Amino acid sequence: MRRFLLLILAAALCVSCLVSCDDRFDVDDVSEPFAGSAETVGVAASKAKVIILSGQSNAAGVAYVSEIPSESAAKYAAGFDDILLNVNNSMSGHDTDGFVKTTTSWGDNHDGIWFGPEVGLAEQLTEEFPGEKFYIIKYAWSGAELESLFLPGKGAYKQLCKAVDDGLAALREQGLDPEVVAFCWMQGESDACKRGPAKRYDGNQMKMVKALRERYGGFFFLDAGISPSWPFYTRVNNAKVYADCVLEHCEYINSNYHGLVVSPNDIAHYDAPSMLKLGQLFGSRIAQHIEIIGE
């Protein structure tokens, strides 16, 4: 039922949209797999390495656990001991209430039928950084537009900051010294439904990233593109590329180039293999850009 309601919301958002924009960003989706910074950022081994995962429903997780290939399902259900997860889902209220090991239990619902990018992210981090602990703080708001909700001072931005602040405080209470090393962003579908927010996406994203960095330091920003399901998706994806090339320590991940696809019965959300791959792409790029220094 909840998935059906999300589909109705997506359709309602897009009902008045036109199919193309008339500015320089309305071109074919970028063909490069990645765009943006190439540098590596050093992080002290003594730090508790924090990754923020945020966005709307494809960040919250609306991919079916039942679609995970059977040979991998048991591994994902058992979870990853070294990759701990703290979840705050604004729409569903499905929260971990602290850090737990990353499993398929923490999608955008209460009954464990959905999962999000954190699963593939945890798998890839375990492969790239064997024996290293990471702490994922996930805050997502299904259907949340960047322009109306994630800009500084808006509702989702405030709740995101509270979720991160609470997560960092919990780590400090354990005697750890946390540092936000990366921010994984899966958002833009709602902005791609309307001409105005789509045209302003690059400027809005730069405002958000700059404000968050003032608060949490110079983390690496990893930005996933959105699917072709949305009327202004090329405008939003190319705006992401522009913003990620202008800002330092940013990289755009071309989801479409990498074969991510939505479910055949749900134009708004990635299927399970694509959701796993999205997380793996986030993890592989973190490994490309984050170097752990010292003992």
Image (spheres, rainbow, N blue to C red):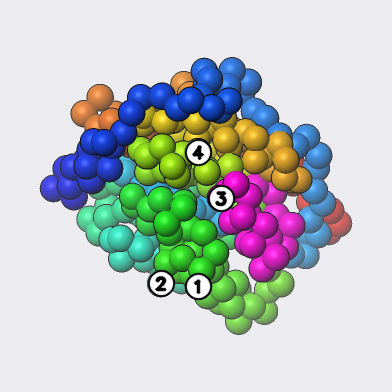
Mark 4 lies on a secondary structure that is: helix
**Which residue is drawn at the image coordinates 65% and 35% (left, top)?**
242
Q: Residue furthest front?
A: 22
Count residues near mark 4 (Cα–Cα under 10 Å), then give few for <14, some for 14-19, many for 20+: many
**Quarter of image, res 14:** top left
**Sequence order check, earlier mark of 2 and 3:** 2
Disc 1 marks a residue whose amino acid type is: Lys
Q: Left or right: 136 with respect to 290? A: left
**Which residue is drawn at the image coordinates 62% and 33% (left, top)?**
241
**Sequence order check, earlier mark of 3 and 1:** 1
Name the residue that disc number 2 marks. 97
Mark 2 lies on a secondary structure that is: loop
Quadrant containing the C terminus is: bottom right
Disc 3 marks a residue whose amino acid type is: Asn
**Which residue is drawn at the image coordinates 23% and 45% (left, top)?**
9
x, y percent for residue 167: 54, 71
Q: Residue furthest right?
A: 294
Residue 162's tag is: 1
Name the residue that disc number 3 marks. 204
**Sequence order check, earlier mark of 2 and 1:** 2
Q: Nearer the viewer, residue 210 or 66?
A: 210
Q: Left or right: 88 with respect to 50? A: left
Name the residue that disc number 4 marks. 199
Asked if the magenta segment contains residue 38, the reply would be no
**Quarter of image, res 110:** bottom left
x, y percent for residue 274: 41, 30
Q: Left or right: 109 with respect to 5? A: right
Q: Which residues are magenta?
A: 203-221
